[in-house]
Image (cartoon, helix red, strand yellow):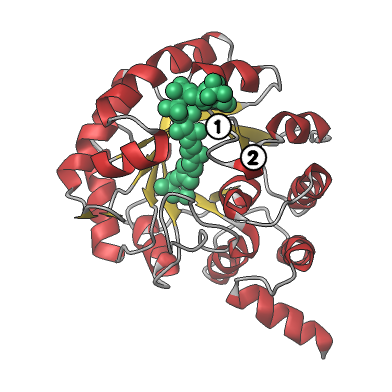
Amino acid sequence: MSLPSRVQLIDVGPRDGLQNEKQPVPAAVKIELVHRLQAAGLTEIEVTSFVSPKWVPQMADNAEVMNGIQRQAGVRYSVLTPNAQGFEAASKTRPDEIVVFGAASEAFSHKNINCSIAESIERFAPVVQAALAAGIAVRGAMSCTVACPYEGEVAPERVAYLAGLMKQIGVQRVDVADTIGAGTPLKVQKAIEATLPYFDVDHICGHFHDTYGQALANTLAALQMGVWNFQSSVAGLGGCPYAKGATGNVSTEDVVYMLHGMGIDTGIDLDKLVDAGAFISGFLGRQPNSNVAKAILNKRLG
Ligand code: HMG
Ligand code: MG
């Protein structure tokens, strides 16, 4: 199959990236990060999550962040909503898309959202209905589609099972997530293959963490199957609080550099993106977790 000529990137840095930060990040910094991402040409940004502040304290300022953003026309702002309570709070902040998030592994479902896969679907169903009725788009994140921090390897049949349930309740598109970044290209392709009976390739997003340094290879493997929507995190921020040791998503800078080098359009200005990554990394007191960002920043020093 020929490669797509254009790729749509969803930057999940403000949410997946910052949710795991131990040091408090003020809402104003998160808002500035979103502004810098949209100025760099990102047209989809996962801004925050409406989850329990006891579980994920860093996202407690969700409404403040959503309400503080100066929205740009043509940009889609998404938020995570695990249940009706989260959706109710989120809907007041006018997200363009909500994300229900389930897992292909039972153990991860319990650790992350405190219920079984079947129970999670029961909770999501009314949320999906309410969102669609309100004209809000719905994405479903599928965690642990390759491996689980508690159960080890996850079989593609488990992914198919979850994808089928997500489809049944009206989810419009899904993220095939390698939560702990343990996947390799053929395994990621199997997870995507397992999803394809339920969602066509235009409605599948690749969401690859880079813990083992495989995320770019996994991105290429997904591209070869025709996937053209991907999530990535500026400066490679992040990790999941319930996937110990897992590092952030593949950095948006690395993905953009690879795609542009292959002649694939993203609409993103790499220099401005590197600036956005340097901004948030500077605040956090470290270097961006991105080879491309580091190379470009070093080159600028002359
Ligand atoms: P629970 O304790 O089972 O919920 O948590 P509950 O309904 O029994 O309620 C207990 C308390 O939580 C109550 O408060 C509720 O009000 C409150 P209390 O009476 O004790 O003061 N509560 C809420 N507060 C705010 N917003 C809400 C909400 N719901 C209940 N929406 C729950 C269930 C899902 C809420 C909890 O487990 C939770 O918040 N988990 C957080 C999970 C999370 O954010 N994980 C990280 C994101 S997922 C991820 O990173 C993976 C992804 O990137 C893809 C990948 O890489 O795999 C997407
Ligand atoms: Mg993630």
- The residue wearing badge 1 is 51
Q: Quadrant of residue 244?
A: bottom left
- The residue wearing badge 2 is 59
Asked if disc 1 is less than 8 Å from ligand 1, the answer is: yes
Q: Is residue 159 left or right of residue 287?
A: left
Residue 17 picture location, percent across and down: 59, 53
Q: Amino acid at mark 2?
A: Met
Q: Nearer the viewer, residue 240 or 183?
A: 240
> Split into 4 quadrants, where in the image is the N terminus?
bottom left
Q: Nearer the viewer, residue 191 or 47?
A: 47
Can you see residue 291? yes
Residue 173 picture location, percent across and down: 42, 32
Q: Quadrant of residue 261?
A: bottom right
Task: Tell me which residue sits at (74%, 32%) in the image.
Answer: 66
Indicate whether 292 appears above or below 49. Answer: below
Task: Tell me which residue sits at (47%, 16%) in the image.
Answer: 127
Within 10 angstroms of label 2, few (less than 14), some, or many (20 or more) residues? Answer: many
Q: Secondary structure at mark 1?
A: loop
Whichever of callouts 1 and 2 sits on the residue coming sooner in the sequence is 1
Can you see residue 170? no
Q: Are marks 1 and 2 in contact (CB under 8 Å)?
A: yes
Q: Amino acid at mark 1?
A: Val
Within 10 angstroms of label 1, few (less than 14), some, or many (20 or more) residues? Answer: many
Q: Nearer the viewer, residue 98 or 19?
A: 19
Q: Is residue 190 left or right of residue 40?
A: left
Task: Tell me which residue sits at (82%, 87%) in the image.
Answer: 301
> Split into 4 quadrants, where in the image is the C terminus?
bottom right
Q: Is residue 232 left or right of residue 108?
A: right
Q: Secondary structure at mark 2?
A: helix
Q: CA distance from mark 1 to mark 2?
A: 7 Å
Asked if disc 2 is less than 8 Å from ligand 1, the answer is: yes
